[in-house]
């Protein structure tokens, strides 16, 4: 009996426990389902002007999207509906001054163990890199006109750099930098030009980028996203070489590689400029007045001789290519089949492109090896075109003879019929 009673007690207690646990789970679930209380957004979205703006912008902000809110950056108590939510005793740290902003953002962005919980792939060196830049160094010296994090990323509507609406998205970066760097009034007092944006907009790079090809560089590609120091004289060629690897290799091995370094000339930039990099022309090599070579070399030196030979080689290849192209065009228009000669000629076009890269060896023999090969190929294509035209002429002659024979036959028939008509 006693044993039975005890077991029913146990049963009753177990049932009680189950109910309590169920009620607790229900309560927990209800709490989890309801959005967390956010008095900061609730109150600020009712405020006018600069105090209301942050709450209105915030839904587009990456920090909002990963579940962070005002208090995660500014501190304070989001469960308190009163102005007390912003009491320093509740950890409120207010809005940072300009000089405080890098450390304000760095509290999270320089903390790998915190950032890993959200995105293990994200770098955490933005602040340390920033402090090495001209912007960061000058900020430390009390210059508040330089760029800090929010000047490039905006604030309260910060977007991931992969978002095309972000001010740091590749096609928007130049405008972002230009807000200061192209404003002569703002940059007054600094001894640097304010034409970088205007020059860059005229470059091949800007045109390629505007066309949607993000493999072309914008300001931050060359200057670094956070370490915004201009590449020094010795590393300028390396910046270009990250994308134009062949040009760099040839240049480094060329007589100019060592000579430019010794004289302190800035590699690629010496001939191509840094911001207004335009499409090069063949007239840049050679002895034409537009030739770059003649800015340093004079008649009689080896550089002049090389320029003359390279320029001559390129001209010869272009002329041979042009002749062959014209003959094949004529043959195609008269319905002749010359597709294999076309394929052959396209390899001469590749040789022309290769020769323009090979110019960077500044070695006439190396360039002429490529241009001569292209000239030979062009000549073969030209011969094939001429043969096709001969064939066309031969066929035309055959056709003419056949036509004359047909005309004679028809008129013979005609007279024969007339004769028969008359005789009846
Ligand atoms: C009851 C309304 C109310 C609540 C709740 C509230 N704020 Fe404010 N907040 C204000 C007003 C009004 C101001 C304007 C300046 C002032 O009077 O202190 C302000 C100013 C600020 C400022 C600017 C301070 C400065 O130094 O310029 C920040 C940052 C801020 N609030 C963040 C927060 C955060 C974060 C929360 C939540 C933890 C929060 N606020 C909750 C009303 C509120
Ligand atoms: C990612 C961090 C971050 C988050 C999240 C954030 N802020 Fe800010 N907030 C800043 C920074 C940085 C400044 C200083 C901006 C400046 O000086 O240009 C600032 C400035 C402010 C100011 C002062 C504006 C002024 O013009 O004086 C207010 C008010 C403010 N924030 C409110 C809010 C509110 C409300 C939220 C939530 C809706 C919020 N912030 C979310 C970083 C943040
Ligand atoms: C409370 C911690 C915290 C603070 C303070 C903070 N951030 Fe963030 N930030 C994050 C987290 C978390 C992410 C989301 C990372 C992810 O998921 O990619 C993020 C994302 C970003 C991203 C997008 C990165 C990407 O590629 O996805 C940028 C840009 C950014 N923050 C800039 C700033 C700036 C500028 C400040 C200072 C005004 C700042 N953050 C302050 C925590 C913070
Ligand atoms: C001079 C402009 C500029 C300043 C100042 C700047 N950033 Fe950036 N930031 C960029 C650009 C440009 C990118 C990269 C965009 C891309 O990847 O295409 C970037 C990327 C980021 C990212 C994404 C991860 C990464 O490193 O690529 C984070 C996070 C970030 N910045 C945070 C910060 C913080 C924090 C500060 C202040 C210490 C800051 N940025 C200052 C321009 C700037
Ligand atoms: C908020 C304004 C502002 C923005 C935005 C800004 N900068 Fe600057 N930057 C400055 C100021 C001011 C200096 C200091 C000028 C000096 O060094 O004499 C400077 C200096 C520099 C320098 C060093 C120049 C030198 O030789 O002394 C470089 C390089 C630079 N910025 C690149 C950039 C790039 C790239 C961007 C965009 C990704 C950018 N800046 C965005 C204000 C800005
Ligand atoms: C293709 C690479 C490249 C691009 C793109 C580029 N720069 Fe530069 N920039 C350079 C080089 C190289 C220098 C010269 C460095 C030296 O003299 O040591 C330079 C110099 C500068 C300077 C120092 C002052 C001056 O004019 O000499 C500033 C400021 C600057 N650039 C800003 C910008 C801005 C803003 C953009 C975008 C509109 C930009 N750069 C785009 C490579 C680039
Ligand atoms: C981020 C990669 C990148 C960097 C860095 C870069 N470029 Fe370019 N460059 C490109 C792309 C992409 C094009 C357009 C495609 C092409 O014509 O090769 C281009 C085009 C050019 C052209 C025109 C080529 C033509 O035939 O029209 C020249 C010249 C040039 N770049 C020189 C430079 C110099 C000099 C530097 C360094 C100051 C530099 N580039 C840095 C990617 C880059
Ligand atoms: C001594 C002057 C000089 C220097 C230094 C120089 N280039 Fe050139 N570059 C030229 C000339 C001349 C052409 C035009 C060739 C042609 O079109 O016939 C050219 C053409 C180009 C082209 C377009 C042809 C191609 O390769 O697709 C690119 C890209 C280029 N250079 C990149 C660079 C890079 C990167 C560097 C540095 C590693 C550099 N150049 C250094 C003179 C120079
Ligand atoms: C910025 C000035 C400058 C420009 C532009 C320039 N060179 Fe040079 N070149 C030099 C210097 C400096 C040397 C090394 C000293 C010397 O041998 O004269 C050199 C050496 C040479 C040499 C080796 C000379 C020898 O004696 O072995 C050749 C070949 C050459 N350059 C060809 C060219 C060609 C071709 C161009 C045009 C595409 C050109 N250079 C443009 C400055 C320049």
Image (spheres, rainbow, N blue to C red):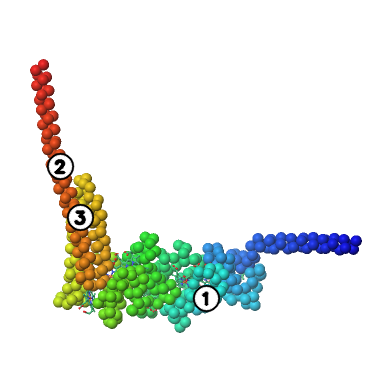
- Front one among 206 and 310: 310
Q: Residue at x 46, y 64 (%)?
A: 162
Q: Relative to 176, is 128 above or below?
A: below
Label number found at residue 396: 2
Q: Are marks 1 and 3 in contact (CB under 8 Å)?
A: no
Q: CA distance from mark 2 to mark 1?
A: 81 Å
Q: Badge 1, how many Cα within 10 Å: few under 14, some, many 20+?
A: some
Q: Position of residue 254 (x, y in %)?
A: 26, 75
Between disc 2 and disc 1, the foreground one is 2
Mark 3 CB within 8 Å of ligand 8: no
Residue 305 picture quarter: bottom left
Q: Residue at x 35, y 77 (%)?
A: 235
> At numbered mark 2, what does the secondary structure look like: helix, strand or loop?
helix
Q: Residue at x 55, y 71 (%)?
A: 116
Label number found at residue 28: none
Mark 1 CB within 8 Å of ligand 4: yes
> At numbered mark 3, what does the secondary structure look like: helix, strand or loop?
helix
Q: Earlier in the sequence, mark 1 or mark 3?
A: 1
Q: Position of residue 329 (x, y in %)?
A: 21, 51
Q: Quadrant of the N terminus?
A: bottom right
Q: Which residue is mark 3?
A: 381
Label number found at residue 110: 1
Residue 238 picture quarter: bottom left
> At numbered mark 1, what does the secondary structure look like: helix, strand or loop?
loop
Q: On the rendered structure, is 22 left or right of 304?
A: right
- Front one among 289 and 118: 118
Q: On the rendered structure, is 182 left or right of 12?
A: left
């Amino acid at each position: 009996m006693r044993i039975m009673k005890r077991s029913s007690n146990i049963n009753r207690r177990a049932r009680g426990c189950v109910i309590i646990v169920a009620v607790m789970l229900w309560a927990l679930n209800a709490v989890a389902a309801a959005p967390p209380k956010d008095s900061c957004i609730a109150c600020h979205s009712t405020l006018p002007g600069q105090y209301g703006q942050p709450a209105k912008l915030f839904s587009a902000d990456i920090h909002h999207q990963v579940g962070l809110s005002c208090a995660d950056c500014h501190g304070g108590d989001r469960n308190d509906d009163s102005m007390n939510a912003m009491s320093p005793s509740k950890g409120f740290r207010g809005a940072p001054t300009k000089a405080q902003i890098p450390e304000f953002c760095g509290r999270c962005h320089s903390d790998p163990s915190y950032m890993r919980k959200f995105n293990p792939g994200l770098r955490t060196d933005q602040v340390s890199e920033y402090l090495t830049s001209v912007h960061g160094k000058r900020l430390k010296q009390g210059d508040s006109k330089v760029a800090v994090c929010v000047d490039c990323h905006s604030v309260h509507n910060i977007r991931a750099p992969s978002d095309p609406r972000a001010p740091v998205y590749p096609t928007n970066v130049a405008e972002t930098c230009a807000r200061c760097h192209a404003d002569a009034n703002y940059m007054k007092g600094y001894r640097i030009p304010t034409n970088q944006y205007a020059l860059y907009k005229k470059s091949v790079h800007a045109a390629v980028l505007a066309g949607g090809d993000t493999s072309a560089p914008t300001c931050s590609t060359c200057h670094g996203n956070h370490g915004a120091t201009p590449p020094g004289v010795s590393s300028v060629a390396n910046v270009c070489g990250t994308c134009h690897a062949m040009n760099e290799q040839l240049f480094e091995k060329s007589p100019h590689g060592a000579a430019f370094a010794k004289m302190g000339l800035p590699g690629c930039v010496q001939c191509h400029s840094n911001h207004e990099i335009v499409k090069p022309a063949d007239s840049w090599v050679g002895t034409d007045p537009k030739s770059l070579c003649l800015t340093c070399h004079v008649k009689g030196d080896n550089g002049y001789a090389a320029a003359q030979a390279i320029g001559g080689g390129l001209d010869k290849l272009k002329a041979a290519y042009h002749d062959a192209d014209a003959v094949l065009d004529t043959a195609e228009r008269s319905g002749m089949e010359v597709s294999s000669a076309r394929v052959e000629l396209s390899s001469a076009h590749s040789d022309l492109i290769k020769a323009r890269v090979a110019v960077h060896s500044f070695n006439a023999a190396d360039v002429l090896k490529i241009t001569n090969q292209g000239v030979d190929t062009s000549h073969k294509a030209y011969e094939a075109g001429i043969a096709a035209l001969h064939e066309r002429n031969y066929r035309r002659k055959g056709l003419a003879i056949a036509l004359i024979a047909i005309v004679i036959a028809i008129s013979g028939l005609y007279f024969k019929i007339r004769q028969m008509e008359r005789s009846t």
